[in-house]
Image: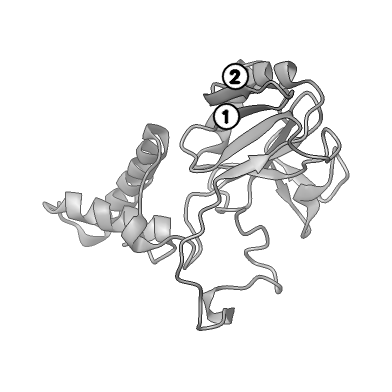
Amino acid sequence: MSTTDARGAAASGPADLAPDLATVELKLEVVVLPVSDVDLAKDFYQGLGWRLDADVRFANGFRCVQFTPPGSACSIQFGTGMTPAAPGSAQNLYLVASDIGAARDELRERGVEVSEVFRPEEPGAQYRSGGAGGRVTEPGAGHDSYRAYATFHDPDGNRWLLQEVTTRLPGRVDIAETTFTSTADLAGALRRAEAAHAEHERRTGRRDEDWPDWYAAHMVAEQVGGTPLE
Protein backbone atom coordinates (compact mmCIF):
# COMPACT_ATOMS: atom_id res chain seq x y z
CA MET A 1 0.00 0.00 0.00
CA SER A 2 1.26 3.47 -0.80
CA THR A 3 1.42 6.27 1.74
CA THR A 4 -2.05 7.78 1.89
CA ASP A 5 -1.50 10.75 4.19
CA ALA A 6 1.74 11.98 2.69
CA ARG A 7 1.16 15.46 4.11
CA GLY A 8 -0.58 14.48 7.34
CA ALA A 9 0.85 14.87 10.82
CA ALA A 10 0.64 11.14 11.42
CA ALA A 11 2.67 10.17 8.39
CA SER A 12 6.03 8.61 9.21
CA GLY A 13 9.19 8.16 7.23
CA PRO A 14 12.49 6.30 7.45
CA ALA A 15 13.72 8.64 10.19
CA ASP A 16 10.97 7.32 12.48
CA LEU A 17 12.00 3.68 12.07
CA ALA A 18 14.17 1.71 14.46
CA PRO A 19 17.78 1.35 13.29
CA ASP A 20 17.78 -2.47 13.49
CA LEU A 21 15.62 -3.10 10.42
CA ALA A 22 15.16 -6.67 9.23
CA THR A 23 17.59 -7.76 6.52
CA VAL A 24 15.91 -10.99 5.37
CA GLU A 25 13.84 -10.25 2.26
CA LEU A 26 10.10 -10.80 2.70
CA LYS A 27 8.31 -10.00 -0.53
CA LEU A 28 4.53 -9.70 -0.58
CA GLU A 29 3.62 -12.28 -3.21
CA VAL A 30 -0.14 -12.94 -3.12
CA VAL A 31 -3.35 -11.44 -1.72
CA VAL A 32 -6.34 -13.78 -1.34
CA LEU A 33 -9.75 -12.42 -2.37
CA PRO A 34 -13.01 -13.86 -1.00
CA VAL A 35 -15.46 -14.55 -3.85
CA SER A 36 -18.79 -16.36 -4.13
CA ASP A 37 -18.58 -17.49 -7.76
CA VAL A 38 -15.10 -18.50 -8.88
CA ASP A 39 -15.92 -18.63 -12.58
CA LEU A 40 -17.60 -15.21 -12.51
CA ALA A 41 -14.60 -13.72 -10.72
CA LYS A 42 -12.26 -15.38 -13.20
CA ASP A 43 -14.16 -13.89 -16.13
CA PHE A 44 -14.03 -10.45 -14.51
CA TYR A 45 -10.29 -10.38 -13.84
CA GLN A 46 -9.51 -11.97 -17.19
CA GLY A 47 -11.60 -9.20 -18.74
CA LEU A 48 -9.32 -6.65 -17.09
CA GLY A 49 -6.44 -8.03 -19.14
CA TRP A 50 -4.62 -9.34 -16.08
CA ARG A 51 -2.34 -12.34 -16.59
CA LEU A 52 -3.87 -15.68 -15.69
CA ASP A 53 -1.11 -17.60 -13.87
CA ALA A 54 -3.01 -20.66 -12.72
CA ASP A 55 -6.38 -22.34 -12.37
CA VAL A 56 -5.85 -25.60 -10.52
CA ARG A 57 -8.49 -27.99 -9.17
CA PHE A 58 -8.15 -30.94 -6.85
CA ALA A 59 -10.26 -34.01 -6.19
CA ASN A 60 -11.25 -32.79 -2.72
CA GLY A 61 -12.94 -29.69 -4.19
CA PHE A 62 -10.13 -27.24 -3.53
CA ARG A 63 -9.56 -24.77 -6.39
CA CYS A 64 -7.08 -21.93 -6.76
CA VAL A 65 -7.08 -19.24 -9.47
CA GLN A 66 -4.25 -16.72 -9.67
CA PHE A 67 -4.03 -13.46 -11.64
CA THR A 68 -1.30 -10.83 -11.77
CA PRO A 69 -2.02 -7.18 -12.70
CA PRO A 70 0.24 -5.77 -15.45
CA GLY A 71 3.53 -4.55 -14.00
CA SER A 72 2.77 -5.91 -10.52
CA ALA A 73 5.11 -8.02 -8.40
CA CYS A 74 2.14 -9.14 -6.30
CA SER A 75 -0.67 -11.41 -7.50
CA ILE A 76 -4.22 -12.18 -6.36
CA GLN A 77 -5.72 -15.59 -5.70
CA PHE A 78 -9.29 -16.74 -5.19
CA GLY A 79 -11.08 -20.04 -5.36
CA THR A 80 -12.83 -22.59 -3.15
CA GLY A 81 -11.59 -23.61 0.26
CA MET A 82 -9.15 -20.70 0.46
CA THR A 83 -10.57 -18.26 3.01
CA PRO A 84 -13.41 -18.05 5.56
CA ALA A 85 -13.83 -14.33 4.82
CA ALA A 86 -17.19 -13.21 3.46
CA PRO A 87 -17.26 -12.66 -0.31
CA GLY A 88 -16.71 -8.98 -1.12
CA SER A 89 -15.12 -8.19 2.25
CA ALA A 90 -11.71 -7.28 0.77
CA GLN A 91 -11.73 -3.50 0.68
CA ASN A 92 -9.37 -0.78 -0.57
CA LEU A 93 -6.80 -2.93 -2.33
CA TYR A 94 -4.32 -0.54 -3.89
CA LEU A 95 -3.46 -0.48 -7.57
CA VAL A 96 -0.80 2.15 -8.26
CA ALA A 97 -0.54 3.76 -11.70
CA SER A 98 1.75 6.46 -13.04
CA ASP A 99 -1.16 7.88 -15.09
CA ILE A 100 -4.48 7.43 -13.35
CA GLY A 101 -6.43 8.90 -16.26
CA ALA A 102 -5.03 6.34 -18.68
CA ALA A 103 -5.61 3.51 -16.18
CA ARG A 104 -9.21 4.60 -15.64
CA ASP A 105 -9.85 4.93 -19.38
CA GLU A 106 -8.57 1.41 -20.02
CA LEU A 107 -10.78 -0.05 -17.29
CA ARG A 108 -13.81 1.73 -18.75
CA GLU A 109 -12.96 0.44 -22.22
CA ARG A 110 -13.02 -3.06 -20.73
CA GLY A 111 -16.52 -2.51 -19.39
CA VAL A 112 -15.65 -1.79 -15.75
CA GLU A 113 -17.63 0.83 -13.82
CA VAL A 114 -15.01 3.17 -12.34
CA SER A 115 -15.52 6.27 -10.23
CA GLU A 116 -14.41 9.70 -11.34
CA VAL A 117 -10.86 10.65 -10.39
CA PHE A 118 -10.96 12.43 -7.05
CA ARG A 119 -8.74 13.95 -4.38
CA PRO A 120 -9.54 13.48 -0.67
CA GLU A 121 -10.20 16.81 1.03
CA GLU A 122 -9.77 15.28 4.47
CA PRO A 123 -7.67 12.35 5.70
CA GLY A 124 -9.20 8.97 5.04
CA ALA A 125 -11.87 10.14 2.60
CA GLN A 126 -10.51 7.81 -0.09
CA TYR A 127 -11.49 4.80 2.04
CA ARG A 128 -15.15 5.73 2.31
CA SER A 129 -17.52 3.84 0.08
CA GLY A 130 -19.67 5.62 -2.47
CA GLY A 131 -20.00 9.39 -2.36
CA ALA A 132 -19.58 9.63 1.42
CA GLY A 133 -18.08 13.10 1.17
CA GLY A 134 -14.70 14.64 1.84
CA ARG A 135 -13.66 14.42 -1.80
CA VAL A 136 -13.04 16.80 -4.68
CA THR A 137 -13.76 15.34 -8.10
CA GLU A 138 -11.05 15.53 -10.77
CA PRO A 139 -7.95 17.08 -9.19
CA GLY A 140 -6.85 18.29 -12.62
CA ALA A 141 -3.51 18.56 -14.36
CA GLY A 142 -0.45 18.86 -12.17
CA HIS A 143 -2.05 17.30 -9.09
CA ASP A 144 0.39 15.98 -6.52
CA SER A 145 1.66 12.40 -6.47
CA TYR A 146 -0.24 10.18 -3.98
CA ARG A 147 -3.28 12.47 -4.07
CA ALA A 148 -5.40 11.26 -7.00
CA TYR A 149 -7.70 8.25 -6.66
CA ALA A 150 -10.47 6.30 -8.37
CA THR A 151 -12.36 3.19 -7.25
CA PHE A 152 -14.00 0.12 -8.76
CA HIS A 153 -15.40 -3.20 -7.54
CA ASP A 154 -15.38 -6.79 -8.72
CA PRO A 155 -18.68 -8.73 -9.01
CA ASP A 156 -18.64 -9.62 -5.29
CA GLY A 157 -17.95 -6.07 -4.16
CA ASN A 158 -14.25 -6.44 -3.38
CA ARG A 159 -13.10 -2.83 -3.65
CA TRP A 160 -10.05 -1.67 -5.58
CA LEU A 161 -8.48 1.72 -5.03
CA LEU A 162 -6.53 3.22 -7.93
CA GLN A 163 -3.86 5.67 -6.83
CA GLU A 164 -1.58 7.79 -8.99
CA VAL A 165 2.07 7.84 -7.94
CA THR A 166 4.63 9.61 -10.10
CA THR A 167 7.22 10.71 -7.53
CA ARG A 168 7.90 8.39 -4.60
CA LEU A 169 8.39 9.58 -1.05
CA PRO A 170 11.99 9.18 0.20
CA GLY A 171 12.95 5.68 1.29
CA ARG A 172 10.06 3.90 -0.42
CA VAL A 173 12.19 2.34 -3.16
CA ASP A 174 15.73 0.97 -2.92
CA ILE A 175 17.86 2.83 -5.48
CA ALA A 176 19.70 -0.43 -6.20
CA GLU A 177 16.41 -2.01 -7.30
CA THR A 178 15.00 0.81 -9.38
CA THR A 179 12.96 -0.67 -12.22
CA PHE A 180 10.14 0.22 -14.57
CA THR A 181 7.74 -2.69 -14.68
CA SER A 182 5.83 -1.73 -17.81
CA THR A 183 6.33 0.22 -21.02
CA ALA A 184 3.58 2.62 -19.89
CA ASP A 185 5.44 3.45 -16.65
CA LEU A 186 8.70 3.96 -18.53
CA ALA A 187 7.01 6.12 -21.16
CA GLY A 188 5.40 8.26 -18.47
CA ALA A 189 8.73 8.74 -16.69
CA LEU A 190 10.38 9.71 -19.97
CA ARG A 191 7.68 12.30 -20.69
CA ARG A 192 8.06 13.86 -17.25
CA ALA A 193 11.85 13.88 -17.64
CA GLU A 194 11.50 15.50 -21.07
CA ALA A 195 9.34 18.29 -19.66
CA ALA A 196 11.71 18.84 -16.73
CA HIS A 197 14.74 18.80 -19.04
CA ALA A 198 13.17 21.35 -21.36
CA GLU A 199 12.77 23.66 -18.37
CA HIS A 200 16.37 22.92 -17.36
CA GLU A 201 17.63 23.96 -20.82
CA ARG A 202 15.45 27.07 -20.73
CA ARG A 203 16.99 28.13 -17.41
CA THR A 204 20.58 27.41 -18.50
CA GLY A 205 20.08 28.92 -21.93
CA ARG A 206 22.00 26.17 -23.73
CA ARG A 207 21.49 22.74 -25.23
CA ASP A 208 22.47 19.92 -22.89
CA GLU A 209 24.54 17.42 -24.88
CA ASP A 210 24.50 15.00 -21.93
CA TRP A 211 20.72 14.79 -21.82
CA PRO A 212 20.68 10.95 -21.59
CA ASP A 213 22.59 11.12 -18.29
CA TRP A 214 20.33 13.92 -17.10
CA TYR A 215 17.19 11.94 -17.98
CA ALA A 216 18.49 8.83 -16.21
CA ALA A 217 19.42 10.69 -13.01
CA HIS A 218 16.11 12.55 -12.98
CA MET A 219 14.04 9.40 -13.50
CA VAL A 220 15.82 7.42 -10.79
CA ALA A 221 15.57 10.29 -8.31
CA GLU A 222 11.86 10.64 -9.04
CA GLN A 223 11.20 6.94 -8.51
CA VAL A 224 13.13 6.53 -5.25
CA GLY A 225 11.84 9.73 -3.66
CA GLY A 226 15.03 11.74 -4.08
CA THR A 227 15.27 15.27 -5.44
CA PRO A 228 14.75 15.31 -9.23
CA LEU A 229 17.26 17.34 -11.18
CA GLU A 230 16.50 20.91 -12.14
Total numbered labels: 2
Residue 146 shows in this picture: yes
Q: CA distance from mark 2 to mark 1?
A: 8 Å
Q: Residue at x 44, y 60 (%)?
A: 173
Estimate how packed mark 2 is, as few (under 14), some (14 to 19) or many (20 or more) residues with alpha carbons within 10 Å.
some
Residue 112 shows in this picture: no
Image check: 94 left or right of 50?
Answer: right
Where is residue 18, by image quadrant?
bottom right
Q: Position of residue 52 (x, y in %)?
A: 53, 23
Residue type pointed to by label 1: Phe
Check disc 2 and report the residue beneath it. 46
Check disc 1 and report the residue beneath it. 67
Looking at the rendered image, the quarter that the C terminus falls into is bottom left
Q: Residue at x 35, y 62 (%)?
A: 175
Height in image: 71 above or below 43?
A: below
Contact between marks 2 and 1 (CB within 8 A): the answer is: yes
Estimate how packed mark 1 is, as few (under 14), some (14 to 19) or many (20 or more) residues with alpha carbons within 10 Å.
many
Of 73 and 32, which appears nearest the observer?
32
